[in-house]
Amino acid sequence: MSWACLDDGYYDNPKIHSCPLEAVAVHALSVSYCGKHLTDGWIPEYMVPVLTRGVTALVTVLLEKSLWDVSSDPSRPGYFVHNYLKYNRSKNQVKKDRESNAVRQARFRESRNAVSNAVHSPPLPSPPIPKEKPERDISKRKVFERPEPDEVKAFFTSKGINGNEYLKFYAFYDSKGWKVGSEPMVRWRSSAAGWILRNREGRE
């Protein structure tokens, strides 16, 4: 699990003090999103309606207060949290820390096992050898490819669903790493069809 930082002077920062509470909440949510997904401060365009709860006018406030910056990278449309990397670790730093922790934990386990093996105890009877289960042929399993927002929008439109409902679907599953429960998603169109059906039933 990754984490994000807010300066302990955040509460009395002049920029924060001059913002309406709703804009402060969106700023804090955006920092949390970037920390979880290791975006180095980037807020994708499709996440804006989710973070602002549809009140996109708050984006103007965040830009005016220099809490967000417009992305100048064509490959990453949207916004950036201002000075995000000044207070938070970069994606590369997080990965490096995780690798270091994995090595340290592996060494600790090795040293603990070495001590345990040094203590002699009477041999225990060997347990019965379980029958091997045939392995699944994972080569035939379809590899999931994350859809682009435009693909999802086209699918929703073909089902007669217009507006930002496709963004809610995309943002929901993107935040879950495109998993259904604890299992990786296989067919996003099937999940989208179920989403649309539940949405219609909820309105009836």
Image (spheres, grey):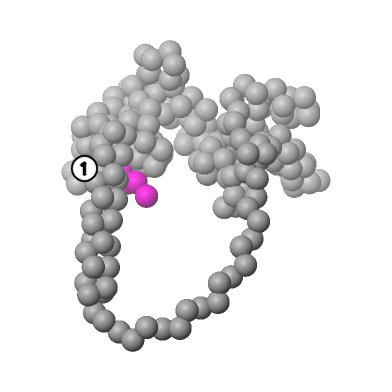
Extreme bottom residue here?
122
Q: Determine the main secondary structure of the stretch shown in magenta.
A: loop
Q: Residue at x 21, y 32 (%)?
A: 86
Instruction: Kindly state the secondary structure of the residue where label 1 is placed.
Output: loop
Q: Is residue 164 visible?
A: no
- Residue 195 placed where, x, y %? 70, 41
Q: Work out whether 105 lies above or below 68.
A: below
Q: Work out whether 91 lies above or below 137.
A: above
Q: Within 10 angstroms of label 1, few (less than 14), some, or many (20 or more) residues?
A: few
Q: Residue at x 19, y 46 (%)?
A: 8
Extreme left residue here?
9
Quadrant housing residue 85: top left
- Residue 182 placed where, x, y %? 57, 52
Q: Work out whether 136 lies above or below 34.
A: below
- Residue 99 placed where, x, y %? 28, 44
Number of marks in picture: 1
Q: Residue at x 46, y 27 (%)?
A: 44
Amino acid type of the residue that numbered disc 1 sits on in the rendered structure = Asp
16 and 174: which is toward the camera:
174
- Residue 3 placed where, x, y %? 32, 46
151 and 200: which is toward the camera:
151
Q: Residue at x 61, y 35 (%)?
A: 144
Residue that badge 1 annotates: 7
| Residue 105 lies within the magenta run | no
Extreme right residue here?
204
Question: Is 19 placed left or right of 163 in the picture?
Answer: left
Q: Is residue 35 visible?
A: yes
185 and 56: which is toward the camera:
185
Range of residues picked out in magenta: 1-7
